[in-house]
Image (tube, helix red, strand yellow):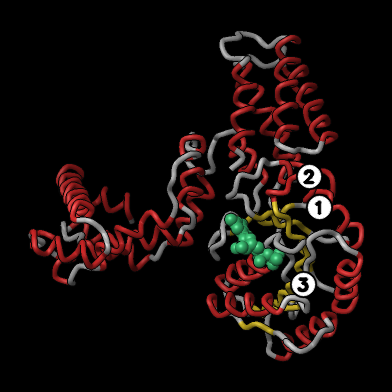
Amino acid sequence: MFESLQDKLSGAFKTLKGKGRITDVNIAATVKEIRRALIDADVNYKVAKEVTDRVKQEALDRKVKVAVEPGQLFTKIVQDELTHLMGGTAKNVNITGSPAVILIAGLQGSGKTTFSGKFASYLKKQGKQVMLTAADVYRPAAITQLQVLGEQIGVDVYAEPDNKNAVDIARNAVAEAKSKGKNIVIIDTAGRLAVDEIMMQEVEDIKKAINPTEILFVVDSMTGQDAVNTAKAFNDRLNFDGVVLTKLDGDARGGAALSVKAVVDKPIKFMSTGEKMEDLDIFHPDRMANRILGMGDVISLVERAQQAYDEEDAKRLNKKMRENKFDLNDFLSQLEQIKKMGNVKDLMGMIPGMGKAVKDLDIDNDSFKPIEAVIKSMTPKERENPDIINGTRRKRIANGSGTSIQQVNNLLKQFDQMRKMMKKMNKLQGAGRLGKMFG
Ligand code: GDP
């Protein structure tokens, strides 16, 4: 995420490396580099200037008072400024009401429908009764897309395929949600490729008709400044409550994330980092600032792990590890857990210092596929006791999984090493401490 900006900012701080003291001269040079980095990341010019002016003032104010290394001082000042720029603290979506009505707006392709599904799934996990509504009357495929998502996450979808009046559909949906006792109804509206009067009028009419609890505007972060301008145009008409940033897993430069709050004065509430239903996070400005500064985001990583974590399963695995009975079935279920946490590359990027290291790595959740295929081609007995897998069996497994004998050999070898390591740890540390590590 935002690798190029990360690189340039760390380059700016590097000019201070080895400098014992902060001076007017190195402050000016560093601030100039920071401004260039922000503008290159497609941050609104005025915003970039305001931020760097504040950074400069802070650095000048603090230079005599604080006896820290200049690089550290600057990092701290920039971290505070970026956090402030992106809204300071995380802001909640208002879901009170019976039902709470959430209206989703944005351009076509920005990720509205995907977000609607993710948000519904997120709320459902919190025990809420949710209903999704397809209010896009122009693209028949939009209704199907929402229905498929609804099916996948187990959430009801309200649609009227023959009705061409989006305002009516939205109104009927709210009535239906009320009669069914739903807590929340999410209304996915139509988008156009660019800001256009008919679309604006339609969303405005829907707003008037149903008086939503919350309007969320979805922004494709890959489109940088354009996204911010669109958000401004929509906000002038709709006065929305919050922004959802999508496609942060792509090579967005960061401009949208960094400018939208300052230009539109509405908080970013969610961020989306992939196409899967799990790839949604509450937007925390401070954590994002840390990521931009290459410090990773361990808190989000732990939260993802907790969401994917199945307590019973963890206890069971813990016991098997202690008893040296961890087998390939368990290995497979561990892979499933990791996949539930979301996009692997994104997860690795949350580890401090890893963002840059994984940038060019060709790794995604599909990288697990051959491993899974190999294990799934084994018989239950083989999975429980891989020692019985001889030459003939290896050949059969390779054929069955569409891999090579070498891939099967590699997996078995790695698994064997893993088991040996577990045994050693059990012996060395005693089961209690290992238990704590995994449980
Ligand atoms: P809509 O027209 O605004 O409803 O947009 P969609 O929800 O149909 O999304 C457009 C495309 O972007 C689809 O192919 C989605 O799978 C994809 N998409 C949505 N959100 C994300 C995201 O956070 N990351 C990535 N990589 N793709 C996304």
For badge 3, the amino acid type reads Thr
Residue at the (84%, 85%) spot, across then down: 168
Query: Which part of the image, by quadrant, shows the N terminus?
Result: top right
Say which mark, if any, is on residue 225. 2
Asked whether the viewer can see residue 430, the reply is no
Q: Is residue 189 left or right of residue 248?
A: right
Q: Is residue 388 left or right of residue 351?
A: left
Q: Which residue is mark 1?
A: 266
Q: Tell whether label 1 touches label 3 (CB within 8 Å).
A: no
Q: Is residue 72 left or right of residue 84?
A: left
Q: Which residue is mark 3?
A: 189
Q: What is the secondary structure assignment of the residue under circle 3?
A: strand
Q: In terms of sequence position, does the residue under pointer 3 or pointer 1 come before the other? A: 3
Q: Position of residue 192 (x, y in %)?
A: 80, 65
Residue at the (67%, 56%) spot, across then down: 270
Q: Quadrant of residue 388?
A: bottom left
Q: In terms of sequence position, does the residue under pointer 2 or pointer 1 come before the other? A: 2
Q: Quadrant of residue 207?
A: bottom right
Judge depth for marks 2 and 1 and give the one in front: 2
Q: CA distance from mark 3 to mark 1?
A: 20 Å
Answer above or below: position of 113 versus 50: below
Q: Quadrant of residue 176?
A: bottom right
How many other residues sit within 10 Å of disc 3, few (<14), some (14-19) or many (≥20)? Answer: many
Q: In terms of sequence position, does the residue under pointer 3 or pointer 2 come before the other? A: 3
Query: Which part of the image, by quadrant, shows the C terminus?
Result: bottom left
Q: Position of residue 420 (x, y in %)?
A: 15, 48
Q: CA distance from mark 2 to mark 1?
A: 16 Å
